[in-house]
């Protein structure tokens, strides 16, 4: 019989006037994998952050194994058997792998104030081997490793002490298939040991496949908790959004011919060690999709086309013969680029929405070298409203926005610049259903206006639904090309990716 | 192309990296020594001279070791010079009554106290460390003037054991070993690096950031207290002057500290600091031997620091450098 391990009673939290979590009451059982889903801004991250000691509660309480939980930070949460793998980077640069794994818990290795570094390193190495991460070395600086490996280190850090409750906060979106498999393995192990996993993800199929039950939040409130064996993705979407999502999600047109007019020609572009001899043409009004495994080189290609790679070889040329060799040149020639790493590469988090939107258009907005507040505000508001950014006002700081709204700000910025060639790298990564639909509608709209879009995506459904042409890359080279066709299936694409 | 790649990979191996780092530093020291030796063989570079250069460099190395704790946390402190003046005057005044004990306790306790005040006020007032320490520097300078009652404070000749070998070297050695041990074998080292890397995250890991910042300042100024002992022993006396003139004493330790930071991924920062200060001492004394005016010396020393750090701490193309 299911045994309750954690109970949330009327948990609430507000940030200023925004009520992020509103009297949410939930129970979790031992040995359960619970999915927690909801749109951006629905309160899932805030809810688990309170559980893990990252934020204090305004109201309500958590009861763990019959006792009320009273914790002030993550380390105290860990000591109570609760641990979290966060969405962003959870390891500290400048420290070794071992130091990161045991950060905050060094007292195990400290005697009379002296830290037994050698013992700490040995223990870390043992754990890494136990997890099968042989390629990660306990004494190396964590900076040597890729984002994905650093996430794997976080997996060790969060699970080595057999936590009673493990929270996985949208970690899978940033991992390759291999990384995800590792994570699923550990989720299953924790369940089999009788402990609980709370799994947050926007990938509904993943949630249905790996969770026993699913709780849905909307606007800070609990809507329902359902058994994953009894629901479909559409059922979940309905619960998340609260209204029937129109069947028009992706593009519904087929058979529209692609214009012959070439707007961008890419010839023999290579980045030593990453991509090799990529050549293709982009046509006016076309959505050209790029797909492949996450390390196939398509993300680097996106940067290379935008002039953001220093050791690129080959040629990227516009129709009028201009060579795109650097970012300023690209922007001046009406090219736009949104990065997969939104928070670090696309947005200035510590700045207002207004300034983020106006950023590339500043020289256009200047009157005789001066920038007028009113003009900037009007400009930013126009495009923020066009994208329906959910904000308190245009002077709100970007770091306060949810992931989906941040992406809308990035797109608003390029709309403002009226770019003709737009390179979108993972445009709907980590974004909820409603905003995704908005972004697809925008892309369709731009396409009709004659703008050309390169969409780099790891989501096959998205590629199939939105692209006029799909180019699949594998191991740094072009592997196949497909034309838009309602008969085209996931398997067709996957076959050429692996 | 292949050779360069192999070399880069070798550099990531810890043991090779530490030999590489030390070797590079020693090579630089040798390089500068050769330049000045060739230019001015009679005045520069004999074994006796070198011993003198080394002994004058260890004052700054001691300060630099303390500075390192602060700098890796991303903080700064302009009051080091003022500390040297104030602590040494307090030490001399006390030594008149209590001899060596007075000197040692006076300098060290005064130093640590200054460190505590700096750290405490910085944490409480929440003003950037640069600004807080400039303000405090002015206060300490005036305090020193007050304690000395405007008079030059001379250290009794009988108490000048730290002015020459082996006293000075032993004292410095204790500091170096202490700094190295703290960095490598205590939580303080890890936490200082963690706070410097991502303060928010460090706080979330349960690290009491404020406590370690204050601790960093106390450590820094405790080491500067040792620096004060050495400074007043070498100089035999200390005069308190106001008007920010103590600032001049800040920069040589700072430069040594940067060697430590730049070479951190190769070898122990303490070793990098010791050799780095020695390099600076060689350059400085080299110019003295050549008879160059003091102003030129400062220009060249500053330039040498820029060149050395720029060529050793290579940021990869496109990296963000603050």
Image (cartoon, coloured by chain):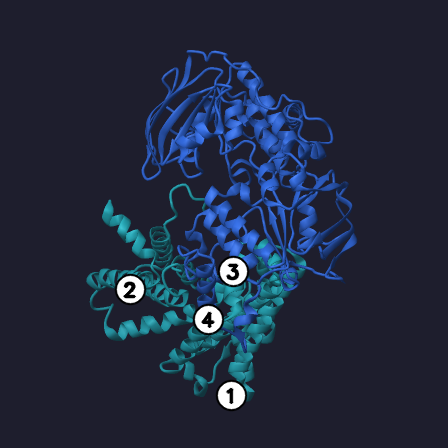
Q: Which residue is painted at 58% across and 65% down in the image?
A: B212
Q: Secondary structure at mark 1?
A: helix
Q: First in sequence, mark 3 or 4: give its number.
A: 3
**Subunit of label 4:** A
Q: Which residue is mark 4?
A: A119
Q: Is residue A350 visible?
A: no
**Residue B99: which disc?**
1
Q: Colour of chain B?
A: cyan
Residues under labels 3 and 4: Cα distance? 13 Å
Q: Count residues near mark 3 (Cα–Cα under 10 Å), then give few for <14, some for 14-19, many for 20+.
A: many
Chain letter for the residue marked with disc 3 in the picture? A
Disc 3 and disc 4 on one polypeptide chain: yes
Residue nearest the observer in this picture, A274 or B26: A274
The structure residue drawn at horizontal position 31% and vertical position 38%, both measured from the top left corner, is A272
Residue underneath mark 3: A101
- Check the residue under mark 1 and report the chain it is in: B
| Residues at marks 2 and 3, CA–CA distance in whole angstroms | 35 Å
CA gap between label 1 and label 2 equals 39 Å
Q: Position of residue A212 (x, y in %)?
A: 64, 46
Q: Which residue is mark 2?
A: B26
């Amino acid at each position: 019989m299911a045994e309750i391990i954690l109970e949330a009673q009327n948990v609430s939290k507000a940030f200023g006037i925004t009520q992020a979590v509103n009297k949410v009451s939930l129970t979790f059982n031992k040995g359960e994998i619970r999915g927690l889903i909801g749109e951006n801004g629905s309160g899932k991250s805030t809810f688990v952050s309170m559980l893990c000691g990252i934020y204090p509660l305004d109201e309500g309480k958590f009861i763990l194994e019959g006792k009320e939980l009273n914790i002030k930070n993550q380390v105290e949460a860990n000591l109570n058997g609760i641990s979290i793998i966060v969405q962003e980077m959870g390891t500290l640069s400048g420290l070794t792998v071992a130091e990161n794994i045991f950060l905050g818990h060094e007292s195990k290795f400290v005697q009379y104030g002296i830290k037994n570094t050698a013992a700490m390193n040995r223990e870390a190495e043992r754990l890494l081997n136990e997890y099968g991460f042989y390629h990660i070395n306990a004494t190396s600086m964590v900076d040597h490793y890729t984002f994905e490996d650093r996430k794997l280190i976080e997996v060790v850090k969060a699970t080595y002490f057999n936590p009673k409750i493990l929270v996985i906060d949208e970690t899978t979106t940033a991992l390759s298939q291999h990384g995800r498999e590792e994570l699923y393995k550990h989720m299953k192990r924790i369940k089999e040991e009788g402990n609980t996993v709370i799994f947050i993800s926007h990938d509904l199929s993943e949630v249905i496949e790996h969770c026993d039950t699913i709780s849905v939040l909307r606007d800070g409130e609990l809507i329902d908790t359902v058994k994953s064996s009894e629901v479909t993705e559409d059922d979940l979407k309905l619960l998340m959004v609260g209204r029937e999502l129109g069947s028009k999600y992706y593009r519904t047109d087929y058979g529209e011919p692609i214009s012959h007019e070439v707007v961008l020609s890419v010839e023999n572009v290579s980045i030593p060690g990453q991509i090799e001899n990529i050549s293709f043409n982009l046509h006016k009004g076309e959505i050209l999709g790029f797909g492949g495994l996450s390390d196939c080189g398509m993300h680097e290609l996106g940067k290379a086309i935008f002039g953001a790679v220093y050791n690129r070889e080959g040629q990227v040329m516009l129709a009028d013969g201009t060579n795109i060799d650097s970012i300023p040149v690209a922007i001046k020639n009406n090219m736009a680029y949104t990065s997969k790493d939104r928070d670090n590469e696309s947005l200035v988090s510590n700045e207002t929405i207004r300034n983020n939107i106006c950023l590339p258009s500043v020289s256009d907005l200047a009157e005789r070298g001066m920038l007028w507040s009113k003009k900037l505000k009007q400009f930013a508001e126009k495009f923020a409203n066009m994208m329906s950014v959910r904000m308190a006002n245009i002077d709100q700081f970007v770091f306060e926005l949810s992931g989906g709204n941040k992406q809308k700000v990035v797109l608003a910025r390029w709309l403002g610049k009226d770019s003709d060639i737009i390179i979108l790298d993972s445009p709907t990564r980590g974004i909820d259903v409603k905003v995704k639909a908005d972004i697809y509608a925008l892309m369709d709209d731009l396409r009709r206006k004659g703008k050309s879009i390169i969409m780099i995506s790891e989501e096959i459904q998205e590629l199939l639904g939105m692209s006029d042409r799909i180019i699949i890359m594998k191991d740094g080279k072009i592997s196949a090309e497909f034309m838009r066709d309602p008969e085209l299936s996931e398997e067709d694409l996957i076959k050429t990716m692996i | 192309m292949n050779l360069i790649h192999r070399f880069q990979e070798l550099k990531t191996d810890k043991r090779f990296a530490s030999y590489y780092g030390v070797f590079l530093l020693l090579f630089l020291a040798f390089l500068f020594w050769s330049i000045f030796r060739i230019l001015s063989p009679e005045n520069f570079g004999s074994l006796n001279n070198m011993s003198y250069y080394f002994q004058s460099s260890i004052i700054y190395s001691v300060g630099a070791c303390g500075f390192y704790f602060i700098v890796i946390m991303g903080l700064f402190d302009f009051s080091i010079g003022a500390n040297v003046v104030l602590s040494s005057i307090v030490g001399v005044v006390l030594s008149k009554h209590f001899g060596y004990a007075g000197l040692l306790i006076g300098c060290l306790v005064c130093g640590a106290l200054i460190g505590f005040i700096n750290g405490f006020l910085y944490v409480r007032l929440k003003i950037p460390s640069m600004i807080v320490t400039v303000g405090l520097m002015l206060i300490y300078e005036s305090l020193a003037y007050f304690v000395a009652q405007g008079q030059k404070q001379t250290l009794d000749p009988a108490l000048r054991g730290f002015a020459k070998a082996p006293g000075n070297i032993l004292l410095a050695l204790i500091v170096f070993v202490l700094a190295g041990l703290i960095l490598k074998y205590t939580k303080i080292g890890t936490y200082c690096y963690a706070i410097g890397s991502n303060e928010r995250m460090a706080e979330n890991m349960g690290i009491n950031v404020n406590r370690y910042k204050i601790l960093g300042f106390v450590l820094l100024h405790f080491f500067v207290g040792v620096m004060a002992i050495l400074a007043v022993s070498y100089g035999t006396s200390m005069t308190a002057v106001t008007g920010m003139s103590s600032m001049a004493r800040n920069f040589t330790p700072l430069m040594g500290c940067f060697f430590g930071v730049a070479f951190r991924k190769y070898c122990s920062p303490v070793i990098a600091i010791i050799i780095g200060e020695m390099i600076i001492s060689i350059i400085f004394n080299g110019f003295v031997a050549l008879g160059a005016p003091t102003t030129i010396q400062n220009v060249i020393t500053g330039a040498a620091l820029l060149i050395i750090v720029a060529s050793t701490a290579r940021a990869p193309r496109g990296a963000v450098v603050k």
